[in-house]
Image (spheres, grey):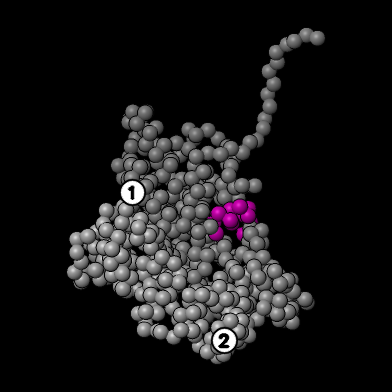
């Protein structure tokens, strides 16, 4: 068989991933604050970009249509919305950019709502908005400054404060502290007693029993029944076995219930008020207002710079007398700036379209509340607006909407369905809300079990298993019926 070389011409179409397309996809899933940070970074890195102050210009129609069509195809390609069809050489794009009438150029943001301008005098000063959150150690040190301490006790208290966890418990022993500090154990013990006498009551305890006893000491409670519950029967008290405790302690159920009520008023985590993570404040990306019978969508663009091309680089990009390398560099930066502007434009348009679709599907929720939320998935919205569901998923990530019912993440409106005994399915979030209301209205002395709640829901035409009720209850951080029981 002879071996020979042949040339063959073959025409194919291929989807490829370009850096510009990667940037457009990335912008889709950024939150409002992340988008602001990205734009600020681009303003620093791309000399062509600058913040626009004059908002009366407009982008030429030919550039706008071309950029929108490119970005639309990026958002709607399947399956991952991550490829762009190559249709021509890059040089044609450079020529188009060079020929743009920059005198009529402006950023292409969708005018989806009213723009509110605030005078500088109305803005609060930076000093009025920044505060340092007080920690438990700060609170204790402030109190220690009001009392005289010996040098050895002062050093021991510093080590004690440094050994407290977020709940206010001491994660060390007197012997261990004395060994590390070189302070005598009696001085460490005095320092520990001084710290344990501070506010909040129970701080610097080494276990739960000591914490509760310290609080009882400061309250002046000497009831032996209360002390017995704390020192010997915390496990049974946690299970709310009041009758069993009454038999063991030889007391009446009423007396044990009264003692248990005293213990229930104590704080098992003294450092709770100062612990935990810093609060995260949500800035809504979308505002949904009801005016008359219609819902109006306003995109939050507060703090987002309006971008345009620097005037100097406009002239360089269309000046044929400039060196080729310089002009190519400027045109590359101009093309990157244009893509960024149009990607942000497309992001805003896509968010607007997705929100419109959500309102159409969940109109009863916006008018009447959580209990009227309907089952919804990404494909429903994707089919409604003519995009791929992966695009909808990216758009709804880390986006929040301010609605007449409160602030919700866009993902909140997408939830699974629970079958009814008869009729259409119901959203899982609506079922959770029903469970929460049932538990909130129950008799605290006879709390409802998960099985009983499942039966009540079935009587209300909602077919749900007991284990599903348990899963939803735990997701809402609601205790079991045993731990919810109150006596007396």
Return the mark for residue 9.
Answer: none
In the image, residue 212 above or below residue 18: below
Left or right side of 476 for 315: left
Q: Position of residue 169 (x, y in %)?
A: 40, 65
Tell me the residue at 78%/77% (across/down). Answer: 422
Tell me the residue at 46%/80% (across/down). Answer: 227
How many tags in the picture?
2
Query: Mark 2, residues whose alpha carbon is within 10 Å: few (<14), some, or many (≥20)?
Result: few
Image quadrant containing the C terminus? bottom right
Q: Position of residue 154 (x, y in %)?
A: 23, 62
- The residue indicated by pointer 1 is 50
Q: Position of residue 482 (x, y in %)?
A: 62, 77
Q: Nearer the viewer, residue 176 or 129?
A: 176
- The residue indicated by pointer 2 is 250
Q: CA distance from mark 2 to mark 1?
A: 81 Å
Q: Which residues are magenta?
A: 385-396
């Amino acid at each position: 068989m002879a071996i020979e070389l042949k040339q063959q011409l073959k025409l194919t179409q291929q989807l490829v991933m370009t850096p510009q397309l990667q940037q457009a996809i990335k912008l889709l899933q950024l939150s409002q604050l992340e988008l602001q940070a990205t734009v600020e970074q681009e303003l620093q890195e791309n000399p062509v970009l600058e913040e626009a102050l004059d908002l009366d210009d407009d982008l030429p129609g030919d550039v706008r249509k071309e950029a929108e069509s490119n970005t639309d195809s990026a958002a709607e390609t399947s399956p991952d919305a991550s490829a762009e069809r190559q249709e021509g050489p890059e040089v044609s794009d450079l020529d188009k950019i060079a020929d743009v009438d920059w005198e009529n150029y402006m950023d292409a943001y969708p005018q989806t709502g009213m723009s509110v301008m605030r005078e500088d005098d109305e803005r609060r000063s930076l000093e009025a908005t920044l505060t340092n959150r007080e920690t438990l150690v700060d609170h204790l040190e402030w109190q220690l400054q009001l009392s005289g301490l010996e040098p050895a006790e002062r050093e021991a208290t510093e080590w004690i404060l440094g050994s407290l966890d977020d709940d206010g418990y001491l994660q060390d022993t007197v012997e261990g502290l004395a060994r590390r500090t070189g302070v005598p154990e009696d001085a460490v013990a005095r320092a520990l007693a001084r710290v344990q006498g501070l506010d909040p009551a129970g701080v610097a305890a080494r276990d739960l029993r000591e914490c509760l006893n310290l609080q009882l000491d400061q309250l002046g409670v000497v009831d032996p029944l209360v002390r017995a519950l704390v020192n010997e029967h915390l496990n049974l008290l946690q299970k709310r076995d009041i009758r069993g405790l009454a038999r063991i302690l030889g007391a009446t159920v009423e007396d044990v219930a009264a003692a248990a009520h005293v213990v229930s008023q104590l704080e098992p985590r003294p450092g709770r008020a100062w612990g935990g993570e810093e609060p995260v404040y949500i800035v809504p990306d979308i505002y949904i207002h009801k005016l008359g019978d219609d819902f109006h969508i306003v995109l939050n663009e507060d703090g987002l710079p309006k971008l345009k091309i620097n005037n100097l680089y406009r002239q360089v990009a269309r000046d044929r007398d400039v060196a080729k390398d310089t002009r190519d560099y400027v045109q590359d930066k101009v093309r990157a700036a244009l893509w960024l502007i149009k990607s942000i434009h497309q992001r805003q348009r896509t968010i607007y379209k997705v929100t419109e679709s959500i309102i159409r599907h969940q109109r009863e929720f916006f008018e009447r509340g959580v209990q009227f939320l309907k089952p919804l998935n990404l494909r429903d919205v994707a089919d409604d607006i003519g995009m791929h569901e992966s695009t909808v998923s990216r758009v709804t990530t880390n986006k929040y909407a301010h609605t007449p019912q409160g602030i919700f993440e866009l993902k909140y409106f997408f939830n699974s369905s629970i079958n009814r005994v008869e009729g259409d399915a119901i959203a899982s979030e609506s079922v959770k809300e029903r469970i929460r209301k049932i538990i909130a209205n129950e008799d605290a002395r006879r709390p409802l079990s998960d099985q009983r709640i499942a039966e009540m829901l079935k009587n209300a035409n909602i077919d749900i298993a007991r284990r599903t009720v348990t899963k939803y209850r735990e997701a809402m951080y609601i205790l079991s019926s045993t731990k919810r029981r109150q006596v007396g």
